[in-house]
Amino acid sequence: MTTVANPLQVSRFLRGYDDAAAQKGIKLSIGFDFHEYVSITRSLPTKRPTYPNFRPDRSPIKLGEGYWMIGVDNNSDVALVQAARLYDLSHSNFAEHLESLKAFYADPTIHAHPQDRCTCIAPSAKTITGKVAYHGDFWLRKDFRGQGMPKIMAATLRGVSFAMWAPDFVVGLAERWLLDKGVLAQYGHARHEPGGSILQLVEEDIADEDLLVWMTGEELRRLVDHHDRTESHLDRSISPA
């Protein structure tokens, strides 16, 4: 993406959503140590295990190429988590990255089970190249659902990713029920295709079929740059659907 982030504009964008989270009783913070992140997520009884994408024992993330976000309530109990990492796909594309299992393991020849498989048939995945920000591992505690938090979570992650990387694409993988229940719309995912990932990771006990969701770098830039025009409508836009 041939642009740089405007620090003042990004700060205004993030401040709006940080304030919105605080109004709902959640304090957001960011971390970079993924050993700490895994320790936190393992303590959450209702959260599915973190995929190997964000686990340093399977896919180490260099400093500056990944971060995680946590939100705690007024009692300092964890209310939400999510994570992001940067993939350099300048000589590849997202479909190839998934099918090679390099999206999940730093070295599939060492960590992958012989029966591990990933198939990506979403057509747009082959066009997703360059600096690709992958957002995933979203979890929101049940008592904070239905309050517009998905929009806050997704927007905050997008703002931080834009500030750190100005990526060519932002991508994610989402279960079909999130589309059917309208949750994808709450996260602001306007683009989605079936067949993003048909995944089997034997030792991880993972068998999923997910949609591909994505945003271009230019769309991300416009989202941040146009924030001032929509800031007065922020509360309305994050009200429960």
Image (spheres, rainbow, N blue to C red):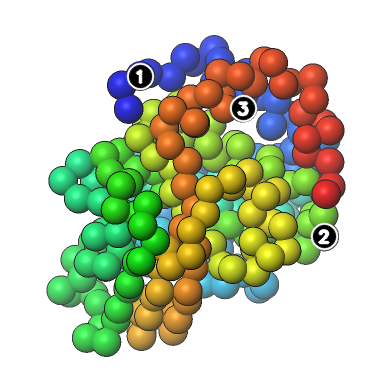
Q: Is residue 62 visible?
A: no
Q: Amino acid at mark 2?
A: Asp
Residue drawn at point x = 26 percent, y = 39 percent: 130
| Front residue (pair 116, 23) | 116
- Check if mark 2's residue and mark 1's residue have beta carbons within 8 Å: no
In the rendered image, residue 197, in percent from the top left (x then y), is placed at 40, 68
Q: Residues within 10 Å of mark 3 (few under 14, many from 20)?
A: many
Q: Quadrant of residue 54?
A: bottom left
Q: Residues within 10 Å of mark 1 (few under 14, many from 20)?
A: few
Task: State the SS at label 2.
Answer: helix
Checking the image for residue 155, the label placed there is none
Q: Amino acid at mark 3?
A: Leu
Q: Is residue 85 visible?
A: yes
Residue drawn at point x = 73 percent, y = 63 percent: 181
Q: Is residue 83 left or right of residue 150?
A: left
Q: Is residue 88 left or right of residue 54?
A: left
Q: Is residue 90 left or right of residue 128?
A: left
Q: Quadrant of residue 218?
A: top left
Mark closest to the chain's N terminus, 1 or 3 = 1
Q: Which residue is mark 1?
A: 3
Q: Which residue is mark 2?
A: 143
The quadrant of the picture occupied by the N terminus is top left
Mark closest to the chain's N terminus, 3 or 2 = 3
Q: How many marks?
A: 3
Residue 10 drawn above or below residue 149: above
Q: Amino acid at mark 1?
A: Thr
In the rendered image, residue 165, in percent from the top left (x then y), is placed at 37, 31
Cα separation, mark 2 vs mark 1, equals: 39 Å
Residue 81 drawn above or below residue 176: above
| Front residue (pair 173, 62) | 173
Q: Is residue 25 left or right of residue 30?
A: right
Checking the image for residue 14, the label placed there is 3
